[in-house]
Amino acid sequence: LGRIIGRGGETIRRLQEESGARIQVERDSSRVLIKGEADKVERAKELVLDIVNSPPPNASGGGGGFKPGGGAGYIKHNMAAGGCEGKIIGKGGESIRDLCQRTGAKIQIDKDSASVMIAGTQAQVDEAIKLVQAIIDEGPTVYMRPGGQPGAEQQQQQRGPGGGGAAYGGGGGAVYGGA
């Protein structure tokens, strides 16, 4: 269970972010509880089982537990995320799930080292590299608020008929003033 939580809760946070589900570890009963939408719960379950079923990092001489099933023909590739970690993961892990499904490769993001780890067959890894690189080439997404500055807000005034402001009374009706 300690491997699911990770050092300082790092692993469980990554699993929650990647899956979009809420994961709780109950050490006293040796259970892992996963809550959320069905598809997100399923993704979280897959990620937890990958950790549980992989040998401990020092049992295999290293590797950090990133094993997509092992065996002959599987390769690993690390690449810089170029500041696009969140964009590669997507809202609720949607983008990274889609990439994994489309390519058949296992893709993990390490936000601490700003890197993307891809594992699978040569063909799966090559396709995943191509798709991830396309996301990185687009650059990080910057969300702008009205007014043009990140985080800046611009006050907008609503106008009623005739260009005047609208005041709403206690009965739910609107009273409009002319200009």
Image (cartoon, rainbow, N blue to C red):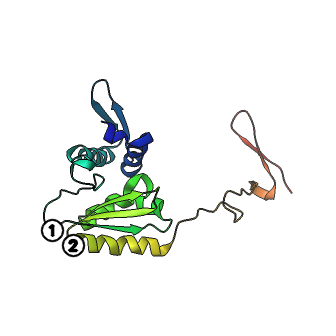
Of residues 22 and 82, which is closer to you in this image? 82
Against 172, residue 59 (above or below) is below
- Residue occupied by mark 2: 122
Q: What kind of residue is marked 1?
A: Gly
Where residue 131 appears, x then y in whole percent? 35, 72
Percent of width and height locating residue 19: 36, 49
Q: Quadrant of the C terminus?
A: bottom right
Marker disc for residue 45:
none
The residue drawn where x is 27% and y is 74% is 126
- Is 163 positioned to the left or the right of 16 in the image? right
Disc on the earlier residue, 2 or 1: 1
Residue 72 occupies which quadrant of the picture? bottom left
In front of the other: 70 or 159: 70
Q: Residues within 10 Å of mark 1 (few under 14, many from 20)?
A: few
- 22 or 125, which is in the foreground? 125
Tell which residue pokes out farthest to the left in this image: 72
Residue type for callout 2: Gln
- Label 2–label 1 contact, CB within 8 A: yes
Q: Is residue 75 left or right of residue 131?
A: left
Q: Residues within 10 Å of mark 2 (few under 14, many from 20)?
A: some
Residue placed farthest to the right in the image? 179
Which quadrant of the structure image shows residue 28? Answer: top left
The residue at which mark 1 appears reads as: 73
Where does the N terminus fall, quadrant-wise? Answer: top left
Callout 1: SS:
loop
- Secondary structure category for the residue under label 2: helix
